[in-house]
Amino acid sequence: MSASIKIDKDFANKQITVLSEFKAPKEKIWDAFTNPDITDKWWAPKPYQAITKQSDFKNGGQWLYYMLSPEGEKHWCLAEFYNIKQAESYEVTDAFCDENGNLNNDFPRMNWKNSFEEENGTTRVTNEITYARVEDMKQILEMGFEEGYSMGLNQLNDLLNEKKI
């Protein structure tokens, strides 16, 4: 069964909002988003694989990872964490980079606010993703963000249903 996912694109405010729901406790979903051992299992859309080089989930910490293509290509990303409210929300600035975390300015940065709420055993995740320019938002959408992130969220849902996390 697929995860419940709703994606809203607000070009006027340069924001994408993703609402997803999982039949799991909030702590488990929080860990799935913040623990790289778990995130690596679902973050990249298949057939890609997410691989963490380093992660330090704390205010001012970073997550340096890459998405490995079936052909062996590595697409590096750097996430910088801030405003962490344990098991409630956190914010992150995400960007494409090289293997040393040097930003690739050919691609836009994204600011994510991730919030987690649980009710009756179901956890709702809200991702508010904002961009500096509407052109940046359009570029990320054209690269397949909507399909890729939905695939990742469904992979997380599958892992939960199979009790693999």
Image (cartoon, rainbow, N blue to C red):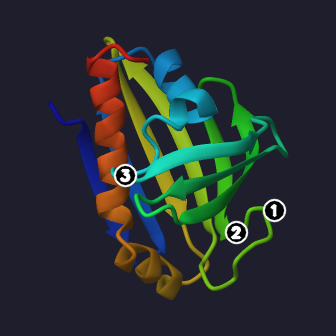
Residue type (three-letter) at the residue carrying disc 2? Cys
Residue 141 falls left or right of residue 98: left
Q: Is residue 106 above or below residue 59?
A: below
User: In the rendered image, which quarter is residue 131 located in?
Assistant: bottom right
Measure the C-alpha gap from mark 1 to mark 3: 23 Å
Depth check, front residue: 9 or 74: 74
Picture coordinates of residue 87 (x, y %)? Answer: 60, 23
> Are the residues tagged 2 and 1 within 8 Å (C-beta)?
yes
Measure the C-alpha gap from mark 2 to mark 1: 8 Å
Which of the image's four quarters has the N terminus?
Answer: top left
- Identified at 51% across, 28% down, the residue is 32
Depth check, front residue: 71 or 95: 71
Depth check, front residue: 165 or 117: 165
- Mark earlier in primary sequence (3, 2): 3
Residue type (three-letter) at the residue carrying disc 3? Pro
Give the numbered dot on residue 45.
3
Picture coordinates of residue 71 (x, y %)? Answer: 43, 64
Residue type (three-letter) at the residue carrying disc 1? Asn
- Mark earlier in primary sequence (1, 3): 3
User: In the rendered image, which quarter is residue 24 located in?
Assistant: top left
Give the numbered dot on residue 100.
1
Residue 51 falls left or right of residue 161: right
User: In the rendered image, which quarter is residue 133 located in?
Assistant: bottom right
Q: Is residue 44 above or below residue 161?
A: below
Which of the image's four quarters has the C terminus?
Answer: top left
Callout 3: SS: loop
User: Which residue in the protein does label 2 denote?
Assistant: 97
- Identified at 63% across, 62% down, the residue is 76
Q: Is residue 78 above or below residue 152?
A: below
Callout 1: SS: loop
Measure the C-alpha gap from mark 3 to mark 2: 19 Å
